[in-house]
Amino acid sequence: MPEYQQAQQVQEFTNEIFEISKASWTAQNRRRSKTQHELTEAEFLALDILAKAGRSLNVGEIQREIGVLPAQMSRIIRALESKGEKPLVTCRINPGDKRKIDVELSPAGTEAHHAYRQVKLGTIQQMLEGLDEKDRNELMRLLRIIRQNIHKSLHNNAL
């Protein structure tokens, strides 16, 4: 395939993925319950990192993982401390290094993380329902390649 056609095809794929993303966002907004915490993607990523770690992390560790600026990370943490009736995270001064702040997922944060994740997963599951087994297997194969490319890109940009 000539380079121009290949570039045009990649642009078409890019547009299609973007349109799928927009439709997914709309579906998620409609599925979200009225009692659920409104989380930004960065707030969810912070909760997700803490949930996967299973322990407290310092603000800098979370910041590096998400890839935001220090001022943005401060706003994310403050937002998570003040969302809803109970804080989604708790913060403490690190006993080993008083310059660092340790952040831990609270029980309310665990619930909010789970609820947000379930809405996302439910929307994706709904989008995949019409695919037969062959198409699901092919899509899975392609998604794994795309995810590997994203991880390579993130690793290369972090260096």
Image (cartoon, grey):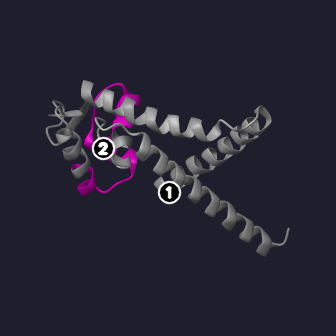
Q: Nearer the viewer, residue 94 or 48?
A: 48
Q: Quadrant of residue 119?
A: top left
Span highlighted in magenta in the image = 47-74
Q: How would you classify the magenta stretch by its main secondary structure?
A: helix
Is residue 43 at all visible to an observer of this figure?
Answer: yes
Disc number placed over residue 157 in the picture, else none: 1
The mark lying in front, picked from 1 and 2, is 2
Residue drawn at x 31%, y 36% is: 36
Q: Quadrant of residue 62?
A: top left
Q: Quadrant of residue 140?
A: top right
Mark 1 touches mark 2? (CB < 8 Å): no
Query: Is residue 104 shown in magenta?
Result: no
Residue drawn at x 27%, y 55% is: 72
Disc number placed over residue 38 in the picture, else none: 2
Q: Nearer the viewer, residue 110 or 150?
A: 110
Residue 60 at x, y = what percent? 29, 45
SS category of the residue bearing label 1: helix
Is 88 situated left or right of 115 in this image?
left
Residue 111 at x, y = what percent? 32, 27
Is 96 situated left or right of 125 in this image?
left
For label 1, the crowd category at 10 Å Cα-Cα, with few meaning under 14, some 14 to 19 and many 20 or more, is few
Residue 81 at x, y = what percent? 19, 39
| Quadrant for the N terminus in the image | bottom right
Residue type of the residue flagged with mark 1: Asn
